[in-house]
């Protein structure tokens, strides 16, 4: 839950510096409360504060970058409608008849039509997050809010399907009631859109994927530093004791260093003393 | 004449100008503003206000070294710029005119 909260907040914040600032403030205050009050109180405070902060970032993020957010929301909505539209066309074509004489079993269409809305939402959320380079989850969240508000608009479709089961060929008992469908869509669509937005960010290694990693640690990795500098971003200075280097990577580097074969003399004594490797901070900048 | 400061903006600017122990950063500003205005402000509200003040050129910030208690994340430490001090002085003058007392009675 905590990682998901951090991931969500990171996706709502526009830069690595902002992520360090907000997530660091939350972590520091939680630690303070843990020492002063109790662990449970601190965790409850963290969850409530992360929710409040996320809500404010969604609202103010749209106000700060209206064009970016509106463009991404519109593009995401178009993708949602396109995928849902394909499902609808397939249904209608099955009812009316295919122009090429191809017959498609209505039973085979059931899962397709039933999941078209959710598949469209995932694709739309992903497209929206891809377009919004800064704070990708701000337009995704707005898209989810719009989906929740507009899901009752899909009511006529469910009414049509429920009123003409003999036309579609599905048994009437298999069709859910209109209220059930609307409620399901109101919950499923926003969730699917948010998951689509988060899912697109994860494999790319873009900022939300390293939400749990402080900016100084991420940028201490030389390839990440070069990537950041190419984009014109700010890479923090490496500290002299390399404390910014992730602990796991430091352990792996030491292990690789020690596992490497060393030159030995005729008496099988090492010629080069084993010393831990060092990194020149100037060379990596 | 520059634009007037909002209520929260003025409180945040004042907290940055007069930090308690150590430099002003998000959490210290949040504690000062919450105490000053008598209600609990969220981390997000203070962050967005500080970002707005920085965009207006009223405060400037630098990132500190990573801090262990913050999970290895750095702090963003804020300082009021000359423009920020001018804005504070203007806000004091406006408040003094509005409420009809001498500007010296309004402490920053």
Image (cartoon, rainbow, N blue to C red):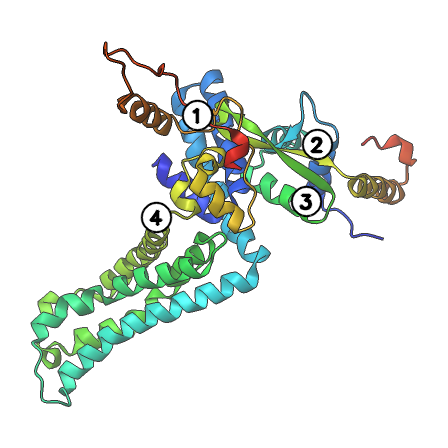
Per the image, the residue denoted by label 3 is B54
Q: Secondary structure at mark 2?
A: helix
Q: Secondary structure at mark 4?
A: helix
Where A181 sits versus A263, above or below? below
- Figure quadrant of the N terminus of chain A: top left
Q: Nearer the viewer, mark 3 or mark 4?
A: 4
Residue most extreme to the front:
A266
Where B35 sits versus A20, above or below? above
Marks 1 and 4, the one that precedes in the sequence: 1
Q: CA distance from mark 1 to mark 3?
A: 30 Å
Marks 2 and 3, the one that precedes in the sequence: 2
Q: Position of residue A161 (x, y in %)?
A: 19, 75
Would residue A207 be visible to someone looking at this image? yes
Q: Nearer the viewer, mark 1 or mark 4?
A: 4
Q: Which mark is residue B15?
A: 2
Q: CA distance from mark 3 to mark 4?
A: 31 Å
* Position of residue B41 in the picture relative to residue B93 (left or right): left
Q: Which mark is residue A202?
A: 4
- Asked if both marks, 3 and 4, belong to the same chain, the answer given is no
Chain designation of label 4: A
Quarter-of-image position of residue A262? top left
Identity of the residue drawn at 49% across and 34% down: A216
Where A140 sits versus B91, above or below? below
Q: CA distance from mark 4 to mark 2?
A: 38 Å
């Amino acid at each position: 839950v905590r990682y998901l909260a951090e991931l969500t907040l990171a996706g709502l914040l526009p830069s690595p510096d902002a992520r360090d600032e907000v997530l660091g403030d939350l972590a520091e205050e939680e630690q303070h409360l843990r020492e002063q009050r109790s662990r449970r109180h601190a965790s409850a405070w963290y969850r409530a504060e992360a929710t409040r902060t996320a809500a404010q970032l969604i609202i103010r993020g749209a106000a700060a970058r209206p064009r970016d957010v509106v463009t991404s929301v519109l593009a995401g909505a178009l993708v949602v409608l396109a995928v849902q539209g394909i499902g609808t066309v397939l249904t209608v074509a099955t009812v009316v008849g295919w122009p090429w004489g191809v017959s498609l079993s209505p039973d085979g269409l059931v899962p397709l039509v039933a999941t078209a809305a959710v598949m469209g939402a995932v694709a739309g959320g992903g497209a929206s997050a891809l377009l919004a380079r800064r704070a990708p989850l701000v337009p995704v969240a707005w898209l989810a809010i719009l989906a929740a508000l507009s899901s009752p608009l899909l009511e006529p479709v469910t009414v049509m399907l429920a009123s003409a089961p003999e036309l579609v060929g599905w048994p009437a008992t298999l069709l859910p009631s209109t209220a059930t469908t609307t409620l399901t869509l109101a919950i499923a669509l926003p969730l699917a859109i948010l998951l689509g937005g988060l899912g697109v960010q994860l494999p790319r290694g873009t900022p939300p994927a390293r939400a749990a990693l402080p900016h100084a640690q991420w940028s201490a990795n030389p390839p990440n530093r070069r990537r950041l500098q190419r984009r014109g971003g700010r890479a923090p200075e490496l500290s002299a004791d390399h404390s910014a280097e992730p602990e796991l990577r430091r352990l792996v580097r030491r292990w690789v260093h020690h596992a490497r074969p060393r030159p030995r003399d005729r008496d099988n004594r090492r010629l080069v003393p084993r010393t831990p490797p060092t990194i020149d901070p100037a060379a990596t900048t | 004449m520059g634009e007037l400061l909002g209520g929260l903006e003025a409180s945040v600017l004042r907290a940055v100008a007069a930090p308690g122990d150590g430099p002003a950063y998000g959490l210290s500003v949040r504690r000062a503003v919450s105490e000053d205005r008598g209600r609990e402000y969220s981390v997000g509200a203070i962050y967005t206000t500080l970002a707005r003040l920085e965009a207006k050129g009223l405060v400037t910030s630098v990132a500190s070294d990573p801090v262990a208690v913050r999970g290895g994340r750095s702090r963003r430490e804020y300082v009021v710029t000359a423009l920020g001090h001018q804005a504070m002085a203007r806000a004091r003058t406006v408040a003094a005119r509005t409420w009809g007392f001498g500007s010296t009675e309004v402490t920053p």
